[in-house]
Image (cartoon, grey):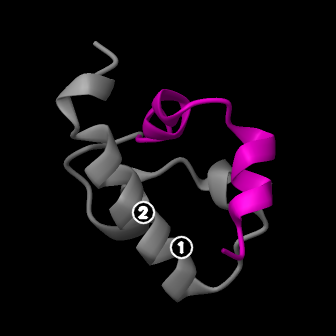
Amino acid sequence: MRYSAALHGEFTSLSEIAAAIVDQNAQGLACVEPSVFEALGIKMLGHKLLLSKGIVALASRPDLRLM
């Protein structure tokens, strides 16, 4: 996995990754804090979109709800 080391280095838990959501109702890249992509070194649009989709799915898990 291309970004695995960066993910492990920047985040200590799945809850931290899920907290990168800035707007659950937005679509595409707008729902994730842009600094996440910078911190992970993700430059390709397709990779950003895939990660955004994964983060949204992760944030919707009941066992990771932050509120």
Locate the C terminus and report the quarter of the image it occupies: top left
Say which quarter of the image contains residue 27: bottom left
Q: Are marks 2 and 1 in contact (CB under 8 Å)?
A: yes
Give the magenta range. 1-21
Of the pair 34 and 53, the residue shown nearer to us: 53
Amino acid type, mark 2 = Ser
- Residue drawn at x 71%, y 76% is 2
Residue denoted by label 1? 48
Instruction: Give the residue at the far top of this rendering.
Output: 67
- Residue 51, position as x, y percentages in the image: 48, 66
- Residue drawn at x 60%, y 55% is 34
**Image check: 54 left or right of 60?**
right
Of the pair 14 and 32, the residue shown nearer to us: 14
Question: Label 2 crowding class (10 Å Cα cut-off): few <14, some 14-19, many 20+?
Answer: many
Q: Can residue 3 be seen in this snapshot?
A: yes
- Residue 58, position as x, y percentages in the image: 33, 46
Residue denoted by label 2? 52
- Residue 45, position as x, y percentages in the image: 55, 84
**Image check: 65 left or right of 19?**
left
- Residue 4, position as x, y percentages in the image: 70, 61
Q: Is residue 47 above or below residue 61?
A: below
Find numbered disc 2 in the image and state the secondary structure of the residue it sits on. Answer: helix
- Residue drawn at x 27%, y 53% is 57
Say which quarter of the image contains residue 65: top left
